[in-house]
Image (spheres, coloured by chain):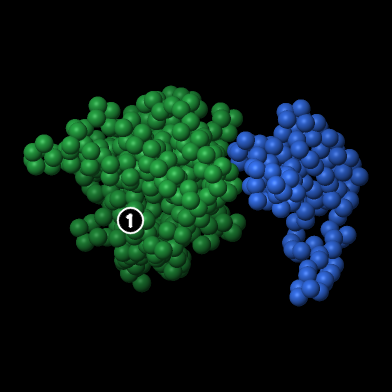
Amino acid sequence: MSEEAAERVRKMADAIYRAESRRVFATLVRLLGDFDLAEEALHDAFRAALEQWPRDGVPANPRAWLVSAGRFKAIDGIRRRARFDTIEDVAEQVDAVTDDAVPWDDEGIEDDRLRLVFTCCHPALSPDAQVALTLREVCGLTTEEIAQAFLSAAPTLAQRIVRAKAKIRDARIPYQVPTAAELPQRLDSVLRVVYLVFNEGYSASSGESLTRLDLSGEAIRLGRLLVELLPEPEAIGLLALMLLHESRREARTSPAGDLVLLDAQDRSRWSRDQIAEGSALVERALASRRFGPYTLQAAIAAVHAEAASADATDWGQIVGLYDALLRADPSPVVELNRAVAVAMHDGPAAGLALIDAILARGDLQDYRLAHAAQADLCRRLGKTAPARAAYERAIALTRQGPERRFLERRLAELPD
Amino acid sequence: MKFLCLICAERVMEQMPETDAERHFEEYSEFTEAIRQSGHFVACNRLVPPDAATTVRVRQGKVSTVDGPYAETKEQLGGYYIIEAQALDEAIQVASRIPGAQIGCVGVRPIAEDARTLRALRLIAPDSPR
């Protein structure tokens, strides 16, 4: 093969690696029964591909070739380490790995990806570990990339991943898709991880940059994968919710990097494609009649997305959707959001009464957005002194740069 | 594989009103019978309240005995099940049906079954191959 042709094969191998490596990994975890062995086998398989494909050509089914190569490399590895183990241990390990009753047809491979998702998001792992492991193993991000995205130190993150893998092994967390009876609870755990990743990217909880594109993008990719593998209504609802939020990304920040609230956003900058896709997904999830909180939140986002302006928004419908959301998933934060919608529908006084009641009850005392919303409604009612006090409380609770600046600007604009 | 389910709650049978205790005993009878039928059951027992617990340590060859359970927490160990399950998910399913899970919590721990442990504990013959 000419140098040029070899280069072409290398490029193909690279593309195949990007497209297939996580699929191949998911299947290798099942065949080898161990995350670290599978990772090592995956790299060995690609190294072999880079040596052999330029010489022999790219196989007809590269995915099957890679799984097969990975498995044989793993067997080699076990045999090489054999001198440290007893004969029986080696025989057992090799038996486990060479069990030909375990198939790997394409359908099986899709199941393996779902197994990997459910294992990484297993509720027996801590939420932090679930997020880190999912980004590492399902999305294929490096430890450094994940650490940077979450503003934490790489060694801390690496250790979290190592511990999570040890827990999977030692606590006997199975590599399987949950049974129908377990599915609702287990799916919740997966959706929570995806939404956590999205939110971390969408509204970075601290730091200067308002949005971190990579994490939101990863979360949407994960959401798509989930809908493709397991089209449950709430998975569809979550993907819709993320797309509808994402559609406003451009309009959320001013050129100077400052926060722009929904009612002041330039709606021509919203992504129509994402809105269309998100709205269609909302319809699909609602039609199932088995929807839950994610679908309802997406439906609310869709009503906003479809309105030509803040004033033209159907606030009555939004209040109705919040009522349904409160029934499905009661929480003070949902109550707060409903109160803001009521303020838009029935005037600031009605909304303020609801927020005052939530805070008087002792809920959301440390939640910056509760104080910010209270401040905003007081300002609109001309109640300057309570507005000032509420802005000050909100600012004290806000770590994120652009959001802080927004609140400080509003505070400075209050009349004396 | 076997899992140990440790049942912890703030109140044990002896600290409950008689009617509650009676109902709780009945729930345990039903649950235990159910897992015998389903093949998950290996062993179980209830512990006498932790007032009767004694903690033993040996340091530099000296036995020290102190009153009370080894960890002072609000939740007390009240009993245990050893169950047979394929993996953690099945063990969680069984553990979630233990009546005590409704009022306290159940810790689920895999029981070590490696050859070294089994040999050391004479659960298999010391010279048995595997």
Q: How far from the left and from the top, in percent, is residue A171?
A: 59, 47
**Relative to the observer, which residue lies in front, A257 or A177?**
A177
Residue shown at 66% from the left, 36% from the top: B85
Q: Is residue A52 left or right of residue B22?
A: left
Which chain does the blue colour mark?
B
User: Hue of chain A?
Assistant: green
Residue shown at 59% from the left, 59% from the top: A362
Residue shown at 77% from the left, 46% from the top: B80
User: For residue A211, what is the image quadrant?
Assistant: bottom left
Q: Chain of mark 1?
A: A
- Provide the residue designation for mark 1: A145
Instruction: Point out the image quarter for the N terminus of chain B.
Output: top right
Q: How far from the left and from the top, in percent, is residue A8?
A: 13, 39
**Relative to the observer, which residue lies in front, A121 or B83?**
B83
User: For residue A2, what is the image quadrant?
Assistant: top left
Residue shown at 21% from the left, 61% from the top: A256
Q: How far from the left and from the top, in percent, is residue A88?
A: 56, 42
Q: How far from the left and from the top, in percent, is residue B106?
A: 70, 47
